[in-house]
Amino acid sequence: MKYRGKVVVTLKSGVFDPQGVTIKNALHSLSFESVEEVKTGKFFEVLFDAENDAEAEKLLEAMCHQLLANPIIEDFDFSLEKVK
Amino acid sequence: MKYRGKVVVTLKSGVFDPQGVTIKNALHSLSFESVEEVKTGKFFEVLFDAENDAEAEKLLEAMCHQLLANPIIEDFDFSLEKVK
């Protein structure tokens, strides 16, 4: 079966996010003064085959741990959907 | 009222994603052979104030159009939640 995993990788809290600060300042200069904080992260969409839902979840989790997210400074979250 | 917007920015279909190809090849070399395609994108979490839901949606949409997404090659999608 084919699955589509949508993965969001963000910095762990406490890890400084200079890109987020830069974007917040840029938004302020574009007159979005009400912006208090911006956090940045990565998004991946992975199309892959798996026997069943359990295996799909296990595979995507392993992909995140081994490559898509840096376990030292990043957290990840994902959703899975079957593809017809 | 305080809102948290979660924004996902992805490349428009048809736009070449070299990073996605590189990640797919890396996943294959890590024995995730069943991966067919990887698409990459950006994720932003924006904490900001707005009068009401409608204004929050309008503000976040404008932030995406003006800064967070490049309208020529990128699409964006977002969700909004009130922050207590």
Image: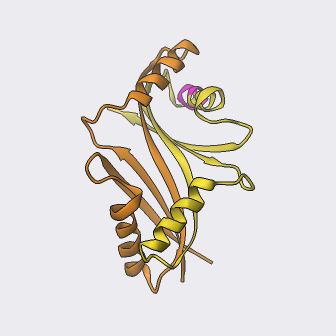
Chain colours: A yellow, B orange
Indicate left or right for A66 with B17 as reference: right
Q: Is residue A19 magenta?
A: no
Percent x, y of residue A46: 45, 31
Q: Quadrant of the C terminus of chain A?
A: top left
On screen, residue A74 above or below B78 = above
Percent x, y of residue A57: 57, 32
Q: Quadrant of residue B71?
A: bottom left
- Which residue is more in the foreground, B58 or A15? A15
Percent x, y of residue A34: 51, 79
On screen, residue B9 above or below A6 = below
Q: Residue furthest front?
A: A29
Q: How many marks?
A: 0
Q: Quadrant of the N terminus of chain A?
A: top left
Q: Is residue A1 visible?
A: no
Percent x, y of residue B70: 33, 52
Q: Is residue A56 magenta?
A: yes
- Which residue is more in the foreground, A6 or A34? A34
On screen, residue B2 above or below A50 = below
Q: Residue at x 60, y 28 (%)?
A: A67
Q: Residue at x 37, y 56 (%)?
A: B77
Q: Is residue B62 visible?
A: yes
Q: Quadrant of residue B30?
A: top right
On screen, residue A82 above or below B61 = above
Q: Residue at x 51, y 15 (%)?
A: B28
Which SS does the magenta portion mostly show? helix
Q: Which residues are magenta?
A: A55-59
